[in-house]
Amino acid sequence: MPSLKELTKNKDLLAGGHRLCGGCGASIAVRQVLLTAGDADVVTSCATSCLEVSTSIYPYTSWKNSFIHSAFENSAATMSGVEAAFKGLKRAGKIPADKKMKFVAFGGDGGTYDIGLQSLSGAMERGHDMVYVCYDNGAYMNTGIQRSSATPKGAWATTAEVGPAQQGKIQRRKDLTQIMAAHNIPYVAQASISHWKDLTSKAEKAFSVEGPAFLNVFAPCPRGWRIPSSQSIEIAKLAVQTGFWPLYEVEDGVFRQTVRVANRKPLEDFLKPQGRFKHLFTPGNEALLAEIQSDVDKAWDDLIGRCATE
Amino acid sequence: MAEQKLVATTGNALVAEAFRQIRPDVVAAYPITPQSSIVEDIAKHVASGRVHTNYVTTESEHSAMSACIGASAAGARVATATCGPGLAMMWEMLYIASGMRLPIVMANTNRALSAPINIHCDHSDVMGARDSSWITLFAETAQEAYDNTIMAVRIAEHPDVLLPVMSCLDGFITTHAVDRACMLDDETVAEFVGEYVPVNALLDTENPSSHGNFSGLGGLYFEFKAQQRAAMARASSVVAEVGERFAAISGRSFGMVEGWGMEDAETAIVVIGSSAGNVRHVARQLRAKGQKVGVLKIRCFRPFPVEEIRSALRGLKAIAVLDRSDSFGAEGGPLYLEIRSALYDLQERPPVVNYVYGLGGADVKLDLIERVYSDLSGIAVDAVEPAPLTYLGIR
């Protein structure tokens, strides 16, 4: 595992000057993941998203590697075609048989948990040698903070409003990482931009396996979460420390917690600084808050139960 | 002219043979009736080890076209096949494939769109995609399906074109009926289609490129679309030229429109696809009785061969357009609207009537075609008032 100093010597494939907001978790996730690709030639794809519209404004591009965007729901399927071409052209003798390349598909949570889930599932099942990276900021931020199946219960979103009859999103989040683990692919991990060492070592593992790998990266959105742009990393850290976003990996079916949390902080510590949860702290919502805490507790216990004890 | 093998087989089997012979680097497809025997044959070719094609069995048609787009942008020669609801599911990606100027070749085994669900032939699927900037060829027979599919590669990959091509054959009628056809040998086809030399390939890692960029308000979206229109216009001469080159190796002539009896016809039926055979059969019988009838078959629907159609139909006394799809709420079916529009600039405009027929595989019997010709001869002498739109053979 290279040190941070060593990593910074690697090629930075996403150029500065892109149009993402200050404090955006997406670009941090992309850069941390791609730093671990080292000298390999990389092709990236991206679902329609903030990341895509901010990095590929014609005639400019922020991508120093080859990059493709085709639509919203098909980053995985599009990249599966690129990877298939690589193999097909090798068989045709048009690409040297020993040539190595990395194929990385990016998508936000909307493009991954929701509209792109089928295409992701198909690509993973087919076993393409590619890494899929979901940057999870828990809503459709590009179109204006609409709720997705990754939006936490109780969070405000522009399609899960707060009023006398409703307190933000009614439903629990979908656990996509577990869904991907159920695909029995070589490598699945949940990571966060706040824990760079953990994230980069997971990205390195994802690149090193033969076949598909999936990374679910927690990536705060200051605009959608109603937090100052200086607080992205702090909030991401609190998500880990409260157990809202456990850091773990599933290698050949074996679950392993990669960052231990000795004393889990109360979930309130993660919720309170975010404007999207503000209403949860108004009188009358105590029961809802307790319910959200208990959901997190249960998910945590389930996960710890699955993780191998050392 | 190359030596050929006479075979008795289905349209689908011949399309699959063409897909083997054009040597695609990637086929990404999803099975759907009545296309499925094409992808099953591809699976056999792959399992036999005779082809280098990387066969991607996607979980939907949307992903099939998405993977085709990724593979084509990567620099591969790419083929696929679908029909009906599958083509409808691809609709978003059809525009992206052409907008990204990717020379993907797709067979479409024309099938009706639900509801009610129906697996049989009509042209609602392809007509729904007629504005998607795909060059669109139609086959009457299994032979034409085979020939069109091979020509499609040359047309799509031509540097003046770089647009995807859809090669259509009628579901069950052409896809599943055993027909007589001639096959070229593998080397002749390989030489005819040549090697694909991609531009700005993703896998050209020495020269990285970005594809599918954002070009919103204030961007160049409008200009990109104008370039597509120009490419489609250039495709007209490329289609004709490739047709001539193909005729030279196969001995089978290719026309964007193909007429029968049109030289001195007084009335004519315009038709697309497999029904052209029935129409020609009836026309032949009527000719034997001394009636001056003709048939105009449209083999290339996009680009729409306006000049060829205009010169073929000029001076006729009455014309019937057969549409195997409807444009509900419009004056008539899509082919009718375009034929009428093509004739608008003529000094003397012949009466044109529209028959929607065969939706969901409804039978097109010879007596129905006779009825159309009979209507036309009445219209030609002003004895019959032209009906704007008739559902032909409706019970």
Image (spheres, grey):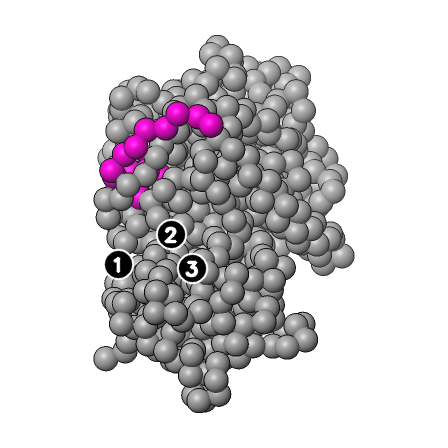
The percent coordinates of residue A241 (x first, y second) are 45, 39
In the image, is B380 to the left or to the right of A286? right
**Amino acid type of the residue tagged 2 in the rendering:** Glu
| Callout 3 amino acid | Ile
Tell me if label 1 and label 2 are in contact, CB under 8 Å. no
| Visible residue check, residue B31 | no
The residue that mark 2 highlights is: B140
In primary-sequence order, the first of circles 1 and 3 is 1
Measuring 55% from the left and 67% from the top, which residue is drawn there? B313
Q: CA distance from mark 1 to mark 3?
A: 19 Å
C-alpha separation, residue under disc 3 versus residue under disc 2: 7 Å
Callouts 3 and 2 in the same chain: yes
First to last magenta residue range: B1-16
| Quadrant of the drawing holding the C terminus of chain B | bottom left
**Residue A288 in the image, given as x and y percentages of width and height:** 37, 63
Please report the residue visible at 48 percent of the width from the left and 84 percent of the height from the top: B381
Query: Which numbered marker is on residue B241?
Result: none
Q: Which mark is residue B119?
A: 1
